[in-house]
Image (tube, helix red, strand yellow):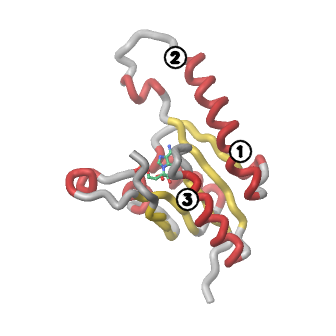
Amino acid sequence: MATYQHILLAIDLTEDAAEVVARGKSLSEVYGAKLSIVHVIEPISFTYGGDIPLDFSGVQEEIEKQATAQLAALAGPLGIDEQSQHIVLGRPESEIHNLAQEIGADLIVVGSHGRHGLALIFGSTANGVLHGAGCDVLAVRVARHS
Ligand code: AMP
């Protein structure tokens, strides 16, 4: 039987994260797989395209600090050690792909709202991760919180 050996949980640090984490944990127990976890921070300069001549480095550092603490709080109870907790800067889809390849993950777990209409056409992060992934991707159907 094919088994997964290294599962990467992609976490957006919203309420959805708990459902992704829970599914990842139970899969890792079924397969005896190692777990890693990642959160990607989009640099503020991506959002503003460098149009605003302000130094955001302090804010960016604070965002990274808080994200690191939040990720550690989720990862701790799962027994994921610090080396397997990843905070990465960039575009979520491509950074998740890059990291999965780098660490040799054979399954990526993301959350999905099962969107319809235009949002489906334009794609969510889950769609972006699915397209172009070098390994299996599991989209966990999460309850809509907003
Ligand atoms: P979204 O398309 O933004 O609703 O996100 C769907 C799923 O993609 C989330 O439940 C996470 O599993 C993953 N995801 C979204 N944004 C990020 C992020 N910045 N870092 C890591 N995973 C993310």
Q: For the N terminus, which image quadrant?
A: bottom right
Q: Are marks 3 and 2 in contact (CB under 8 Å)?
A: no
Question: Seen in the image, is 93 located left or right of residue 7?
Answer: left
Q: Residue at x 50, y 58 (%)?
A: 110
Lower sequence index among marks 2 and 1? 2
Q: Looking at numbered disc 3 in the image, what kind of residue is underneath it?
A: Glu
* Residue carrying label 3: 19
Name the amino acid, label 1: Ala
Whole-percent x and y of residue 93? 45, 50
State how far apart marks 2 and 1 are (Cα).
26 Å
Looking at the image, the residue that sits furthest to the top is 53
Query: Disc 2 or disc 1, which is closer to the eye?
Result: 1
Which numbered disc covers residue 8?
Answer: none
Q: Are marks 1 and 3 in contact (CB under 8 Å)?
A: no
- Is mark 2 in CB contact (under 8 Å) with mark 1? no
Q: Which residue is mark 2?
A: 56
Residue that carries the numbered disc 1 in the rendered image: 73
Query: What type is the residue that disc 2 sits on?
Result: Phe
